Image (cartoon, helix red, strand yellow):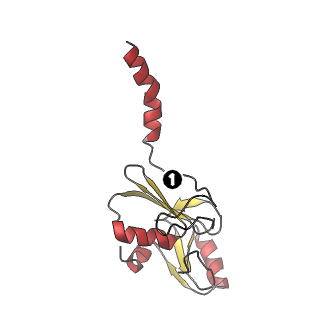
Amino acid sequence: MKKYHLFFLFLPLFMASCKIGPQSIAYGTDGCHFCSMTIVDRQHAAQIVTDKGKVFKFDAVECMMNHLNIIGTEQIALFFVNDYSEPGKLMDATQALYLISPGISSPMGEFLTAFGTREAIGRALAEHDGDQLNWEQLKLIFKL
């Protein structure tokens, strides 16, 4: 009978550990999975979560995309990027709008920035010239 008590005691812990979702980024502490730089930029970080719940953090969208180019996307359940207009806020990378503009530098120097709204990317385009992309176009650039 005591075995069942232990089962019910650890069941919620086990179920919580299987949750697939993003993890918060410890800026200034966490390292980029691709280039090993410390993640400090709250406007350009990114994250992927595998279908088994393993999280990989990146200091820039381009690091995430370059990593995906190596491993593929088949085992990835979720893609996240920081919204440039809301530093530190992770959003669904597949819904983001992207800007490649020399007017906004990114940690790895590819000038790639993610935005959460059309208004925000419109303001950035008005201030800094560049090329606007969606997720599918971004994947084509990185040959995914």
Rendered location of residue 22, percent (x, y) = 51, 53
Q: Amino acid at mark 1?
A: Pro
Q: Quadrant of residue 136?
A: bottom left
Say which of 95 and 84 sits in front. 84
Rendered location of residue 119, percent (x, y) = 62, 73
Rendered location of residue 44, percent (x, y) = 58, 69
Q: Which quarter of the rendering shows the N terminus?
A: top left
Say which of 38 and 56 sits in front. 38
User: Is residue 120 toward the left or the right of residue 77 in the image?
Assistant: right
Residue at the left extreme, as displayed: 74
Helix, strand or loop under label 1: loop
Residue at the front extreme, as displayed: 36
Q: Residue at x 54, y 60 (%)?
A: 91
Q: Which quarter of the rendering shows the C terminus?
A: bottom left
User: Is residue 2 toward the left or the right of residue 61 in the image?
Assistant: left
Q: Residue at x 42, y 49 (%)?
A: 53
Q: Quadrant of residue 70?
A: bottom left
What count of labels does the image hold?
A: 1
User: Is residue 72 toward the left or the right of residue 130 in the image?
Assistant: left
Task: Name the residue tied to disc 1.
Answer: 22
Rendered location of residue 4, percent (x, y) = 38, 18
Other-residue count near label 1 (Cα within 10 Å), few / some / many at <14 / 14–19 / ≥20: some
Q: Residue at x 43, y 34 (%)?
A: 14
